Image (cartoon, rainbow, N blue to C red):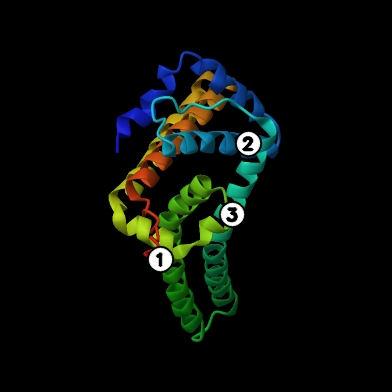
Amino acid sequence: MDFGLSFSYVFEDKDWFRKIAIPALCALIPVLGEFIVIGWGLKATKNVIDGKERNALPELEFGSDLGRGFVVSVIALIYSLPVAIIVGISGAMFGFATEQGGSGSWVLITLGSCIGLIGLLLGIASALLAPPAVANYVAKGEFSAAFKFKEIFAMLKKSFVSWLLVILGQIIALGFIAPLGAIACGIGALLTFVYGTAVYSHLLGQAYNQSAVPAIVEVETT
């Protein structure tokens, strides 16, 4: 994987500012704006998967980007739902233990701690599985592709380091670079958020290309 290219390819496009600024303005739309930016970024993922690593920055297409971003948000929600349920049960047990007090509360605390540990392990698993699941959906254009766990596990196994780099890039791009725009206020924050999305989306496409398992072609013998 070319980690540096994911941060620099944006500026190789002569129209980079326009292509970043338009999604940034769309991000101002309440609720829908984030879906639009996500869907727009995933077109960069598809461009990389299709071999256009240096020409991956996409144009905005309002309707299709909104739909794609919504679908991916649903996929992410489904992957995070078991974690949320487990953490909620653990929190409820700690709450009951605090309210009841007495000698029996340690049982609830112990159970809550064990369930919380399961939630932590599920959270780690979800963080690892969600990126290849999203990339598989983008590559194949089918919602069900995000839940073909045999393929997703095979992708993780084939190039585990690539997916760790995706997570690292996500932390850098959306956790550190994106908030820097707040220094410039308003539109600056939106521009860096969109740029961070473009970086993460490029890494997602690279990781898919590194780890995709080739389809087995059946050859008819005569």
Q: Identify which amino acid the numbered label 3 is placed on.
A: Phe
**Label 2 sits on residue:** 65
Between residues 109 and 51, which one lies in front from this camera angle?
A: 51
- Dot 3, how many residues are within 10 Å of its Cα: few (below 14), some (14-19), or many (20+)? some
Q: Identify which amino acid the numbered label 1 is placed on.
A: Leu
Between residues 110 and 105, which one lies in front from this camera angle?
A: 110
Q: Quadrant of residue 91?
A: bottom right
The answer to whether residue 146 is above or below residue 40 is: below
Q: Is residue 120 visible to the viewer in this orientation of the structure?
A: no
- Which residue is farthest front? 222
The answer to whether residue 201 is above or below residue 73 is: above
**x, y percent for residue 160:** 30, 53
**x, y percent for residue 28:** 67, 29
Instruction: Give the alpha-carbon distance from disc 2 to disc 3, as whole Å.
Output: 15 Å
**Given this view, does label 3 or label 1 mark the residue nearer the observer?**
3
Q: Residue at x 52, y 56 (%)?
A: 146
Disc number placed over residue 121 in the picture, else none:
1
- Disc 2 vs disc 3: Cβ atoms closer than 8 Å? no
Between residues 143 and 189, which one lies in front from this camera angle?
A: 143
Under tag 3, what secondary structure?
helix
Report the side of 68 relative to 102 (left or right). Answer: right
**Label 3 sits on residue:** 143
